[in-house]
Image (cartoon, rainbow, N blue to C red):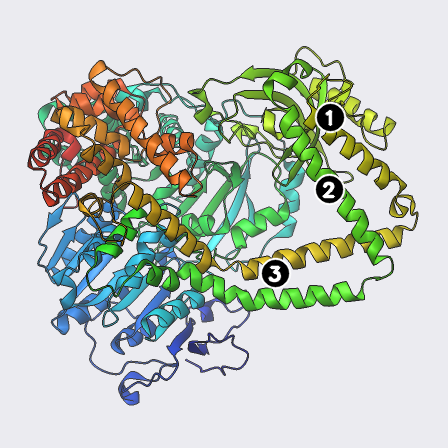
Amino acid sequence: MEESPTAGKRKQPEADLENSENSKQDFASKRRNLSRTCVHEVAVPSGYSSSMDDSVHGTLSNPVYNGEMAKKYPFKLDPFQEVSVACLERNESVLVSAHTSAGKTAVAEYAIAMAFRDKQRVIYTSPLKALSNQKYRELNQEFSDVGLMTGDVTLSPNASCLVMTTEILRGMLYRGSEVLKEVAWVIFDEIHYMKDRERGVVWEESIIFLPPAIKMVFLSATMSNATEFAEWICNIHKQPCHVVYTDFRPTPLQHYVFPMGGSGLYLVVDENEQFREDNYLKLQDTFTKQKLGGGNKSVNGKGSGRIAKGGNASGGTDIYKIVKMIMERKFQPVIIFSFSRRECEQHAMSMSKLDFNTQEEKDVVEEVFRSAVLCLNEEDRSLPAIELMLPLLQRGIAVHHSGLLPIIKELVELLFQEGLVKALFATETFAMGLNMPAKTVVFTSVKKWDGDSHRYIGSGEYIQMSGRAGRRGKDEQGICIIMIDEQMEMNTLKDMVLGRPAPLVSTFRLSYYSILNLMSRAEGQFTAEHVIKNSFHQFQYEKALPDMGKRVHTLEEEAAKLDASGEAEVAEYHKLKLEIAELEKKLMAEITQPGRVLYFLQPGRLVKVREGVTDWGWGVVVNVVKKSPVASGSLPAALASARGNSYIVDTLLHCSLGSSENGSRPKPCPPRLGEKGEMHVVPVQLALISTISKIRISIPSDLRPLEARQSTHLAVQELGKRFPQGLPKLNPVKDMGIEDPEIVELVNQIEQLEQTLIAHALNKSQDEHQLKSFQRKAEVNHEIQQLKSKMRDSQLLKFRDELKNRSRVLKKLGHIDADGVVQLKGRAACLIDTGDELLVTELMFNGTFNELDHHQIAALASCFIPGDRSTEQINLRVELAKPLQQLQDSARRIAEIQHECKLEVNADEYVEASIRPYLMDVIYCWSKGASFAEVIQMTDIFEGSIIRLARRLDEFLNQLKTAALAVGEVELEKKFAAASESLRHGIMFANSLYL
């Protein structure tokens, strides 16, 4: 490797950053050379000196290893693997950032082999239990002395190599497990999971708590800020951390676009990563935008018969065409990615005319299938979800998503690895974890629902999924086919396919579980303050400060250059506008009380809508509905997301094109010249109405046709031209007859300020250049203020305040005393990290659990486990309804206490987010001995999701059992043990095929 100078590299205050970077030749012309390149950087703590022998280990900035290898490989290592191994042999931490199929596992295996050679232990962590099972199998075949710990399975816990989920590692670190004293290496697989909103903090805490003697191997998909991550590791552990980064794909990819309803494929990015603009233009020409029927509607089928009810999904014919074409051209195996589990099943079922396996292969599939289901009891083998799979699998077609029975999912993975599945219909979870490449990957859509809106998939997601295309040593190139059903901007497509991988951003937060565990640790070396200071979040914030400072300096220079004449005038003018806006906001809060405003919100009334900083402009009232408390949580609305408002105003608003297709969240159409939009009816909360006009217009009785909505838009535009100063507003005193003295005073103040504004010199100024200059100056000053306040507003301070407030909550609830010493209740909460620790300890200590039998306890505890929502109405039997009510009351009380302690907690939202009663009935009946076939008829939730919840519930009940034991609640401990035992039967707890 060539060593490049360190000049110009941005340095961390704590770390000297050395850089050795291989030749960066033109990618297109010298692709073959690229296989010989990787980028190596190292973050080194200041004052660090290495005692390594350079002739054996190379230098920090150019590590090479000339000694005897701890493990021999049957193939020649790629440059990035060689460099990574050299870093490991130097006994220094390393982050390997490379594409899925590049071969990161070889590096992890080398670290394990080194630990075995040096008679030390090694821990391998993975983000998911299913991945841990797969990894255990793979490593066990390679090394044999391997154990597994996932919360619901423990095998050989004394093995030299332990595979576990990251949560288990964090628990071991909190409890000061003896095992860690013998561990030399910890391998973090899929470290990019750290940006997961819910669980990312687990990785951050585990890394912070690891003893400095332990070295780390981080395996990650490509990320754009790998160096920053290494600097953080170097900063908190005062040890060097290497980054080995490669963009190299062993098998190059070709990316094609298939226009739905059209025919033929268009190569948009070739194997040299060149964007083919000529083909893109041809694609746009031939594009016939067809409104395909079907959309994202789910198929209503209950229980496990669901998979047979597929039929043709949206674009089924197109997908059928593509799969058929792939098979004819011998481009199989193929993975067809969908972003909906139901759609996966529908697409697979629409392939009924296709058969890809020979008779011999069919026999092998049947044999594997029969032996796999032997681990189930007789009754479960005949479940429709199992029986319906065999004919599909025999034809070489399979489905893979998180809602499948675990045994079927694992069977599909094994058959796919053996080449017996030729067409796999999968969700994006298949792109995680074990290396299961195909020749071709198909994207059935370029948009996905992310819980908030339908958005284009990001470049990071695209890289992860497309990385499954192209099998090393088998394919000349991998093929990606993107199906699109609407015209797509060239840059959007380019960014998706050729965009940079996303950076790793911290999602650090303080949980009560962490605070209590840190308070209860006797040695006091780890405090919550220590964790906050050392978090990646704080590191990233501090690193951004110099950049913010530079930006402020640049803006201040610009402000100085802008025309300074009339500065007092411009300040006065903007002050007037701000004062008016503030008063109007106050006034609208009073006017939009239902008792005052509902009478005036007749159909056709023009209202202005503002959501935070987003101005939706003028809209037309269609209808007002009172919303029931139950429905409030599930409104599919754009603007009805906040709680506590009991009326919704259906308003016709101007939205950007493509808004609210497939149920996506409507977005306002920017009021730019030539910008096309369309009118949609959007549910709006009363509180979001910022202005009400005097004007009412007539609206068509049927607003379903686009023409009817667009004609209303034209009428609103016409009014805008008639009233260039703005539409006349409804006067609260004269028009609405409000006599409240405070409101009368507000109206008078606003009128006076408006008169002053109209008379202001700037209002009369005709000098456009001067106005623009004023406007820009106001914008610049505003940005300077914002940046300065951001720089003042230290994250550390924010977290300290939050810590203070959370500690207050713990005191009020009796988890800690006035001196911060953990009490009995807190000792119980310390042991619970699967469910809401505050809420469940409340039930343990207020007697709720004592009154229930163990079946009711299992059902009630299921409310704590996150999982799929049911769309059906929940009608609970008497013996479950009362405990659920007690749980909801406790949750509301805890939310109110948190609110009192200055935490931003909304009681309704907290209750809704903390309690998920969708499977109470199912768990209750299962605990009482019902069969799986019976319980799946009780809900529309997928079988696999039920099983996943039951297994997490079992883990949760075991934590509750341990907590009850820790606080001397013997009776309760027995109940939790019985509840756990009552779940552990049948298919719910069938062994994994990997174990």
Image quadrant in which you'd find residue 86 = bottom left
- Using the rendered image of the protein, determine whether residue 654 is visible from the camera's viewpoint: no
**Lower position in the chain sequence, tag 2 or tag 3:** 2
Q: CA distance from mark 2 to mark 3?
A: 23 Å
**Lower position in the chain sequence, tag 1 or tag 3:** 1
Q: Is residue 932 above or below residue 768?
A: above
| Eye-nearest disc, 1 or 2 | 1
Q: Are marks 1 and 2 in contact (CB under 8 Å)?
A: no
Image quadrant in which you'd find residue 190 = bottom left
- Residue that numbered label 2 is attached to: 579
Residue depicted at x 42% and y 76%? 14
Q: CA distance from mark 1 to mark 2?
A: 17 Å
Q: Is residue 334 left or right of residue 206?
A: right
Residue situated in front as seen by the camera: 757 or 495:
757
Residue 250 numbered tag: none
Residue type, label 1: Val
- Binning the other alpha carbons within 10 Å of mark 3 as few (below 14), some (14 to 19) or many (20 upward) gives few
Residue type, label 2: Glu
Q: Position of residue 633 (x, y in %)?
A: 44, 26
Residue 788 numbered tag: 3
Location of the N terminus by quadrant is bottom left
Residue depicted at x 12% and y 45%? 966
| Eye-nearest disc, 2 or 3 | 2
